[in-house]
Amino acid sequence: MRLHKDFKGGDRLKGAVFKRCRCSNPETGKRYDTNCPDIKKKGHGTWWFRYEAPPSADGKRRRPRVGPFPSKVDAERELAKELAKVGADGHASDHRMTVAQWLDRWIAGKVDLKSSTLSSYREAVELYHKPGLGHLRLVDLRAHHVSELYAAMLQINQPLPEGKRPSELLRRLIDARADSAKKNKDGEASRKKQTKPLSPARIKRVHAVLSSAMGSAVKKKYLTHNPAEHVELPRQPRRKPLVWTSARVARWEENGKNPAPVMVWTPAHTGAFLDYIYEAERLYALFHLVAFRGLRRAEVAGIPWSDVDLDEGILAIRETRSDDDLEPDDTKSDAGDRAVTIDTTTADHLRTWGTRQKAERFAAGPAWVNSGLVFTRPDGSPLRPEWISQRFELLITQYAAIRRRHEDDGWTIPQIAKRHRVSEVKVRAALAGGPLPPIRFHDLRHGAATLSLAAGVEMKVVSETLGHARSSFTADVYASVVPQVFKAAAEAAAAVVPRRVGPPSAPQSKTSGSLDRTRSR
């Protein structure tokens, strides 16, 4: 056993390297450990080190044993590193700490995060990091472990090759998600989330949490390097929005498939939707505001009346609401904290809504929840952002069902109105509005940006309205969309004019014409 000495102030820090093996005494059955008769033989046993660590929080002495190492040189090198850490700041690594234990400790210290961010961190830790990596010792975590986790995540809700069974890692992830689904009370939204494959974007977000946690472990000297730092992530294709042109709508009506994950309505589609919901939708003002100004759903759910000046036409976006915690959060970023101007029509719709909300407050009486928010439930309590998306999806589905009843099933307007419990005015609006292809609620935000750009608003102004940190990001996302909107508008305008003469045929070249004349001779 070789003794190493280092000093911190006047205190001596001790450490030693030694060999141990797994041989057992044939008479007692107990392991020899460091007392094996063959311990001095070359290649027998493995090398370890022990050192005098700072006392624990309760004052108890700590002399951890660390190993195994393949050679004496390796053990001495690691011992020297550990003694250097202790000498530098009095801190020593806990080599028995698991990844799960560190993640719990790390996330418990994240007291300054807004609730929605903390919730997403916890979800990543509980659904993926701990089931996939939590059993490993923190000091043993390597990049290949992280890569294997992400490979397994990509297999979730994907069909396996015939005859192949899920790996133990994949089974742990599936079990964790199943347990989470049982505890979740979001119903249909939760079920859809649990049955979808994970996207590269989702894995990137999960990786960001792990990388942050491991980076913190490096800062606190539990690790010498970040094992997640150089892991290659699944490639994430760019998801630039496409416009629902007439050709794409026709194709969608044939096969029911969206041409891209992110689709944007034309101005005509947006108008048809707003006309359809105008008469009877309680939260019409909310959808109108988002369709023209592009607020995020968490932002529109978090606007208090105190941040609204309808006379000046200004909304101050300073707070958001999350699904998990209905207490106000900060905006997504510094750029998200902004003032949004609104037009006179939008301001009038908000005034009308405010009058209705006051009537609801009077009707609720003592049961009214005085949240002070612009958009609320009928009892005054905050809206959940996920509910807003679900309501939007329901309205689009209802619109499509009304048109299908009339066109495919031959139902009359009164029959449709009675079946769907809507007014005949609403049915006529759906029939007059034409096909309304599906988009997500968030795509209304894309549509608002497109409307502004198509109207000639400068890119920087649109970027500030949306709350983007960089106008270059706005330009990158929407530059290809505006020409599509102009093209769709041109096609729509041309279709309005009735013509008895069809479009001209393609002109022939001079060469082809001369050849035809030559043949006719």
Image (spheres, helix red, strand yellow):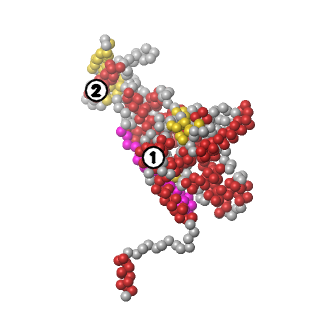
Residue that label 1 marks: 459
Residue most toward the front?
A: 311
Question: Which residue is drawn at the image coordinates 43% and 15% (left, top)?
Answer: 60
Classify residue 416 by image quadrant: bottom right
Residue 498 in picture, x, y percent from top left: 57, 69
**Amino acid, disc 2:** Arg
**Image check: 313 left or right of 379?**
left
Q: Position of residue 325 (x, y in %)?
A: 58, 33
Determine which of the numbered discs, if any, sits on residue 406 in the image: none
Q: Which residues are magenta?
A: 230-257
Residue assigned mark 2 = 77
Q: Is residue 224 above or below residue 485?
A: above
Determine the residue positioned at 36% across, 81% down: 515
Q: Secondary structure at mark 1?
A: helix
Instruction: Please indicate, yes or no, whether residue 255 appears anywhere in the rendered image.
Output: no
Q: Position of residue 268 (x, y in %)?
A: 57, 56
Q: Secondary structure at mark 2?
A: helix
